Amino acid sequence: MATVLLGLALAILAPPFQILTTHLPLPVAGQPYLVQLRVAGGTPPYQWVLLQGGLPPGLALDVDRGVIAGVPSTSAPFAVTVQVTDSSQPPLALTRLLPAAAAAPLALAWTTTPALADAILSGAVRAANAAGAAATVTVIVEAVNERGKAFALRYDHESLANDTATPALAFSESLPPGVYTLHADAVAEVSPGVIYRDHIEQAGLLVPAP
């Protein structure tokens, strides 16, 4: 019993598995560039990979250390999608779009680690507005199984003042057996034609057959 209680306490105290880095510094041509991608929770060591977008010429990702470094040949902004996998069994995987910008205008983060218990997927996510003005923010959370079928878990649409965030948006839903990837998407409309987006996801969520 003591071992079970200790395990529950550690699970409650453990931080959500999430990519903490929300954006990358803007490059400066000819100047050394060094960024440590930050992750919390999960089971180290971690493995990183670039999924979409390309780093500027002169920059490379160290997949074991999660470091982007080099000397860029351009000062142009860019955006890449990265994925990190932890060492748990089965491994968990997170994906995040990282734009190169002075600050992240819109940022999503798990406030409660998505987890499965008795086929019920639960967790919570928060969206923060730092676009420099009030924005209308839409947050959608859905689970997609290995066959591509999507299950809606949460939908929110509200106005956020600058430098504010939504409360923790909790979700809890019973799912049929399968392997799921949980997607959270946020869209912030600051004014007509000025829209920011952020996306995070967690893969490898298994609902076993009864």
Image (cartoon, helix red, strand yellow):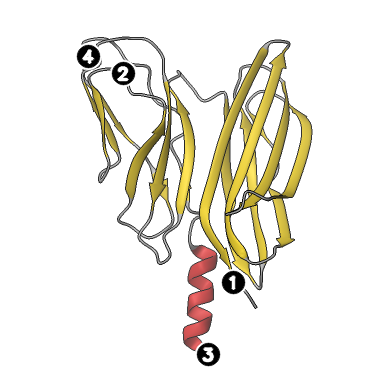
- Marks 2 & 4, CB-CB < 8 Å contact: no
Q: Earlier in the sequence, mark 4 or mark 3?
A: 3
Q: Earlier in the sequence, mark 1 or mark 2?
A: 2
**Looking at the picture, how far across and down is residue 108, in whole percent?**
58, 38
Res. 1 mark: 3
**On screen, 109 above or below 137?**
below
Q: Earlier in the sequence, mark 2 or mark 4?
A: 4
Q: Secondary structure at mark 3?
A: loop
- Residue type marked 2: Pro
| Residue tagged 2 | 56
Q: Secondary structure at mark 4?
A: loop
Res. 31 mark: 4
**Looking at the picture, how far across and down is residue 87, in whole percent?**
35, 60
**On screen, 127 above or below 46?**
above
**Looking at the picture, how far across and down is residue 113, in whole percent?**
56, 56
Q: Secondary structure at mark 1?
A: loop
Which residue occupies 49% across, 22% down? 103
Q: Secondary structure at mark 2?
A: loop
Residue in the foreground of this view, choosing between 70 and 174: 174
Q: Could you tell me how far apart the alpha carbons at marks 1 and 2 are, in whole angstroms?
A: 42 Å
Q: Could you tell me how far apart the alpha carbons at marks 4 and 3 are, in whole angstroms?
A: 57 Å
- Residue type marked 4: Gln
Residue 50 occupies which quadrant of the picture? Answer: top left
Count of numbered circles on the image = 4
Q: Could you tell me how far apart the alpha carbons at marks 2 and 4 are, in whole angstroms?
A: 13 Å
